[in-house]
Image: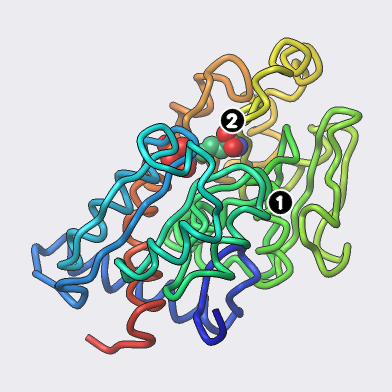
Amino acid sequence: MAGVKHYLQFKDLTREEYDYLFDRSRRIKEMFKSYQQYWPLTDRTLVMIFEKASTRTRLSFEAGMHQLGGSAIYLNTRDSQLGRGEPVEDAAQVISRMSDLVMIRTFEQEIIERFAANSRVPVINGLTNEYHPCQIMADIFTFIEHRGPIQGKTVAWIGDSNNVCNTWLQAAEILDFNVHVSTPPGYEVEPERAGLYGTDHFEQFADPMAAVKGADLVTTDVWTSMGFEAENDERMRDFADWQVDADMMRAAGKDAVFMHCLPAHRGEEVSAEVIDGPQSVVWDEAENRLHVQKALMEYLLLGRVNS
Ligand code: CP
Ligand code: NVA
């Protein structure tokens, strides 16, 4: 509905809004770490709709909403009328009359867009086949904590050009950094599906070792995303040479950090040596989902605050 601010993909916010949100995330994290009670969302309700499995997204949104003084309600396809064919538009009308904020994890981006078009309250993308914006907000916040501003830096994406990769590519355009992508043949980035404005901020490499050379951040994700399980055997064969291993991290350089949105498969997209090694920041990355999403929920409901 007109006038409601949603977060359906990374480019829904501007660089200036991200600057604010990263500052705000830092402040909210400090308050949480120092046991300072902060309840700006008392009596507000977040509805979380999951059509796919989750550990981090559910936990970080649910805990985050409680920490801000509100409550969170979990719905899934199996136990709600969504699984019995109630139109998304009708569900949006009803759910958004009884809540203040909705987070959705679903399949096609089109589903969340239809929901948002019929929602009276802000809708947040908790992962679709195309995008995972909350993840990249957390990843960039983590990079800033470890290495400072991301502008002008190089991120190497190794593996599948999936929802997380697409979101890195959008973020590079908004925040002005570069992404080197290396995928097996047949799995290349589709700029239109990624929702890009142009091709200035990314480069595709046939050789993953060339893609990681000099990168400030090396990242990857599962070879088979949720919803693509039928392709698993074929993907295991196709991606075998795209594992992020110690040689790749050496080619990137000792100051490069390693990230993975998790869950990870050691021995497939990443070696145990890398994900459990000194350059990996994956646990900070996972924790930061909590802090950035609290800043995001506060922003969507209350706008900019100073406290
Ligand atoms: N990274 C992430 O979104 O994890 P979950 O699938 O556990 O939510
Ligand atoms: N690309 C993965 C991310 C999981 C958090 C998936 O969509 O399954």
Give the image quarter of residue 168: bottom right
Quarter holding ligand 1:
top left
User: In this picture, is 109 found above or below 271?
Assistant: below
Residue 10 position within the rendered picture, expressed as x and y whole percent measured from the top left? 61, 65
Left or right: where does residue 166 sit relative to residue 304? right
Q: Which mark is residue 226?
A: 2
Is residue 280 in sight in this rendering? no
Residue shown at 75% from the left, 15% from the top = 240
Quickly name the residue at label 1: 166
Q: CA distance from mark 2 to mark 1?
A: 15 Å
Is residue 229 in sight in this rendering? yes
Q: Residues within 10 Å of mark 2 (few under 14, many from 20)?
A: some
Identity, as a three-letter code, of the amino acid under mark 1: Asn
Disc with the residue nearer the chain's start (2 vs 1) = 1
Residue shown at 80% from the left, 52% from the top = 193
Q: Which mark is residue 222?
A: none
Q: Quadrant of the C terminus?
A: bottom left
Residue shown at 74% from the left, 18% from the top = 231
Question: For numbered disc 1, what is the local secondary structure?
Answer: helix
Residue 174 position within the rendered picture, expressed as x and y whole percent measured from the top left? 68, 72
Q: Nearer the viewer, mark 2 or mark 1?
A: 2
Residue 84 position within the rendered picture, expressed as x and y whole percent measured from the top left? 49, 37
